[in-house]
Amino acid sequence: MLDAVARLRRFNRAVTREAGALDTSFLGRGRPLGAVRVLVMVRPEGTDVALIRDRLGLDSGLMSRFLRSLEREGLIETGPDPDDRRRRIARLTAAGEAEVAAYDAIGHARAARLIARAGARAGELVAAMDLIATLLNRDQLEIRPADPDSPEMLSCWRGYFDELCARVPGARPELFPVPDPGADSYRPPHGRCLVAWSDDLPVGCVSLRPIDATTAEVKRLWVDASARGQGLARRLMAAIEDEARAMGLAALKLDTNSALAEAIALYRQTGWTDIAPYTGAPADTWLGKTL
């Protein structure tokens, strides 16, 4: 039986071959993978060159060579940021947009073929890939505001409600309509929604809605299975508490259920304490925190 390190190296070789990482013409369009990774990170409206370099882990010299090559092909244009001339901005040209669309189409078709090869185990394959990608992207995970009716927020809320229904006695899908009819209470200036992103995949969320002028309720803390065990729930709670402080709130409340033991343990570890019940079933645990 191969040990874990040998199995990981075997996996790396298979992915390198499948992804075409060593090909001089990635996906048959005449450029190496590195140049393509730079190209697809550039947006028509402009992307900070330093952001691309940092996200891809490139040194300045290699980044410069990729940019010059893409400029010579007429796929991008670079120039100073009008608001901060120390920064350089790269923008896609019309030809660049067409080239990115071509790569997207080819990549999508190749990915669909790979998933089809998995047959009945396709769900396992995708879940495993999510786990690996989220772990590899751990240091680049970002928490950003979201609208309660945005696709990413609705996706996270569905994941949260599915878990509640699977784990909490008395929780039923009809109790949790999506989209939420009370979505406006989660929008600024009343409330807040935060989503955790691993690259372009939403992997966690937390929300805040008002109770009164000085108190708000933390709701719907959720982390996707692929991102658990990495401290993301703690980061999300810290982020929403910071949002509450910035809003001038004095205290927070939340309700939960004893079936969600991991969440309750996190709350208690971070200064939340028991308070009087303020909601009904399926909640059976109520906590508060002074800011």
Image (cartoon, rainbow, N blue to C red):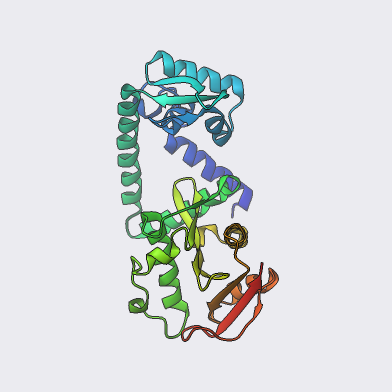
- Judging depth in this view, the residue of 269 and 260 nearest the camera is 269
Quadrant where the C terminus is found in the figure: bottom right
Number of dots carrying numbers: 0
Q: Nearer the viewer, residue 157 or 193?
A: 193
**In this view of the protein, which residue sits in the foreground, 213 or 79?**
213
Residue 3 visible (yes or no): no
Q: Residue at x 54, y 57 (%)?
A: 227
Q: Where's the N terminus, which quadrant? A: bottom right
Where 45 sits versus 110, above or below? above
In the rendered image, residue 134, in percent from the top left (x then y), is placed at 52, 51
Q: Is residue 20 left or right of residue 2?
A: left
Is residue 272 shown left or right of residue 104? right
The residue lying furthest to the top in this view is 72
| Placement of 219 over or under 50, stated as above or below | below
Q: Quadrant of residue 235?
A: bottom right
- The single residue placed furthest to the front in the displayed view is 213
**Location of residue 70 by image quarter:** top left
**Residue 24 at what x, y percent from top left?**
44, 22
Q: Nearer the viewer, residue 67 or 6?
A: 67
Can residue 247 be spotted in the picture?
yes
- Residue 156 lies in what quarter of the image? bottom left
Which residue is at a point 50% across and 24% down the rendered structure image?
Answer: 82
Residue 67 position within the rendered picture, expressed as x and y whole percent measured from the top left:
48, 20
In the figure, 239 relative to 268: above or below?
above
**Left or right: 247 in relation to 159:** right
Where does the image place residue 135, in percent across and percent down from the top left? 56, 51
Residue drawn at x 60%, y 23% as measured from the top left: 60
- Residue at the image position 46 percent from the left and 20 percent from the top: 78
